[in-house]
Each structure stands twice: as structure tokens, then as C-alpha cells.
Amino acid sequence: MIALHDFNYLPEKEALALLTPCVALPGWAEALVCGRPYPSRSELTIAAQALMQRWDEASLAQALSAHPRIGEKPAGEEVEAALSRQEQGAVNDRDAALAQALREGNARYEARFGRVFLIRAKGRSGEEILQALRARLENSDAQEIHAALEQLREITLLRLEGVIHE
């Protein structure tokens, strides 16, 4: 974690390295870095959210290339993998029935929408995640693109909050 003041004056390459694990959309990180300096954490958040409003279905597909299936915590050492493991802490992989239901739900979701199910796991129980997965399987394609983009925005903001503080 780094203070906003320090982030504002980091060399561009280092600032990008801090933001890259927030979302696999390099253009978002580049635009946010180019907008420095930010006078406050809230101004940084406003800028980040404005950039997120430009995201579309192609952005979603690109960002999802770095996301594991819910319930399948990545084992890698990179920052993205560590963040995913931390965010999915409530998904108890020792609950065999829940793990099986998530695997089945993931398979149904991927067959239905052609991409991995994305949800902000932090702050949700495994059962809440499973309920959301089942409910979103009922969405139309357009509804699901909207829902997945909203989840991507929430995840990205959560990660940004974990990287830069006031």
C-alpha cells in the first residue's frame, strides 16, 4: 500500500505496476497514471470510476482473461493471484457440497454466457456467491453483460483502495 502523495510522484513505470493488478485493462491504468497528480483519494476514485464507465463487452472479455473461476483460487505468486485468493476467502474449499455446486454453476454459466462468472467475492459468503450465480444464470445476455461489468468495477475499486491510501 502506498500513500496518494507518493503515488502521485512515482515514476510512470512504477505507478503502472501498482495499478496493473487492479484490473487487466492496461488502458485504464495508463489513463489513471496520466491523470496524476490527484489532490485527494476521492478525486482519484472519481477519475477511476469515470474511466470505468467506458468499459464495454470487449473490455469485460479482456479483463476476464486474468480472473479465475469463483471457488478456484489461483496458486501463482503474482499480485493478481494473491488478490484473488484474498478476495475469495469466504469460499470455503473444505465445504465439498458448496465447492461442487460452484463447479456446476460455473460450468452452466460458462456454457450459457461463454465466459467465467465474475462477482465481487469479498464480503460475501460462499452461499451468497452461489445464490448470486444461480440468479444471474436467469439474466438475458444484455443484463448479464451489465451485471458482470458492475462486478468488475466493484472489484477494481476494492483493489484500488487496497493499493493507494490518503
Image (cartoon, rainbow, N blue to C red):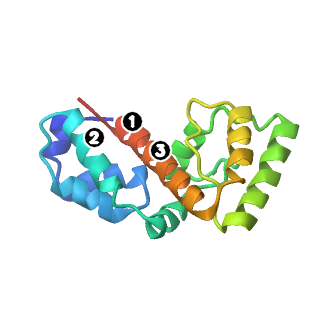
The answer to whether residue 71 of the structure is visible from this angle is no
For marks 2 and 1 on the same chain, the one whose residue lies earlier in the sequence: 2
For marks 3 and 2 on the same chain, the one whose residue lies earlier in the sequence: 2
Residue at 72% x, 58% y: name it: 109
- The image's mark for residue 45 is 2
For marks 1 and 3 on the same chain, the one whose residue lies earlier in the sequence: 3
Q: Amino acid at mark 1?
A: Gly
Q: Residues within 10 Å of mark 1 (few under 14, many from 20)?
A: few
Q: Amino acid at mark 3?
A: Ile
- Asked which secondary structure carries label 2, the reply is helix
Q: Amino acid at mark 2?
A: Thr
- The image's mark for residue 155 is 3
Count of marks overlaid on the render: 3
Marks 1 and 3 in Cβ contact (< 8 Å): no
Residue at 59% x, 39% y: name it: 121
Q: Which residue is at the front of the view, 16 or 111?
A: 111
Give the quadrant of residue 11. bottom left
Say whether residue 143 is left or right of residue 53. right
Residue lying furthest right: 97
Q: Which residue is mark 1?
A: 162
Indicate the quadrant containing the C terminus: top left, top right, bottom left or bottom right: top left
Residue at 71% x, 45% y: name it: 135
Q: Residues within 10 Å of mark 2 (few under 14, many from 20)?
A: some
